Amino acid sequence: MTTYGITKSLAQSFDEVVPAVKEALKAQGFGVLTEIDVQATMKAKLDEDIAPYLILGACNPPLAFRALSAETSIGLLLPCNVVVRVDGDRTVVEAIDPMTMVNFTDNPKLQGVADEATARLTAALESLSDPSTKV
């Protein structure tokens, strides 16, 4: 875990992990609103090659509504970004730590939303199985 993210590293390929992440998010009540293929964008705009890198904009509507009701400017931090990227021979999945909402805004009304979003995103990432760790 970074200071602002929740991380899971997996042995599966990028192409195997992406649909698994989407399903794991769906199981926790998140829909994917946006999908940014950073690798394709860097190639198209800068003619630079980078490893596969995808940013998913994940939203849990009830949680987003509660957050917006507590802090109307919170949309600046929504949706919850989830990154799927290749790092060497591993595929890394990272989700923004929703506690950043509380830390950035210093609004205690967001604490419950952040706690629930953190629990759901953590559960989604933890549900991703890594065959390399099975005995």
Image (spheres, grey):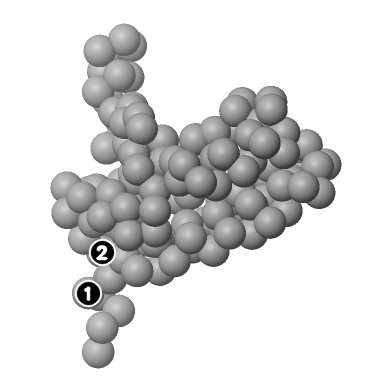
Q: Position of residue 1 (x, y in %)?
A: 56, 59
Q: Quadrant of residue 23?
A: bottom left
Amino acid carrying label 1: it is Pro
Q: 96 and 58: which one is in front?
A: 58
From what the image shows, is residue 130 above or below residue 124? below
Q: Position of residue 3 (x, y in %)?
A: 65, 52
Q: 79 and 8: which one is in front?
A: 79
Residue beneath the point at 72% across and 39% down: 70
Label 2: which secondary element: loop
Report the Cα–Cα distance between label 1 and label 2. Answer: 7 Å
Camera sees residue 92: no
Q: Residues within 10 Å of mark 1 (few under 14, many from 20)?
A: few
Q: Residues within 10 Å of mark 2 (few under 14, many from 20)?
A: some
Q: Quadrant of residue 75?
A: top right
Residue beneath the point at 21% across and 60% down: 12
Instruction: Looking at this view, name the residue that lies furthest to the bottom.
Output: 135
Q: Are marks 1 and 2 in contact (CB under 8 Å)?
A: yes
Q: Left or right: where does residue 38 sit relative to residue 102?
A: left
Q: Position of residue 10 (x, y in %)?
A: 31, 63
Camera sees residue 103: yes
Q: Earlier in the sequence, mark 1 or mark 2?
A: 2
Identify residue for label 1. Answer: 131
Q: Quadrant of residue 28?
A: bottom left
Label 1: which secondary element: helix
Amino acid carrying label 2: it is Ala
Identify residue for label 2. Answer: 11
Q: 3 and 113: which one is in front?
A: 113
Q: Left or right: where does residue 23 sit relative to residue 3?
A: left
From what the image shows, is residue 37 above or below residue 90? above
In the rendered image, the quadrant that contains the C terminus is bottom left
Instruction: Looking at this view, name the residue that lies furthest to the top.
Output: 45
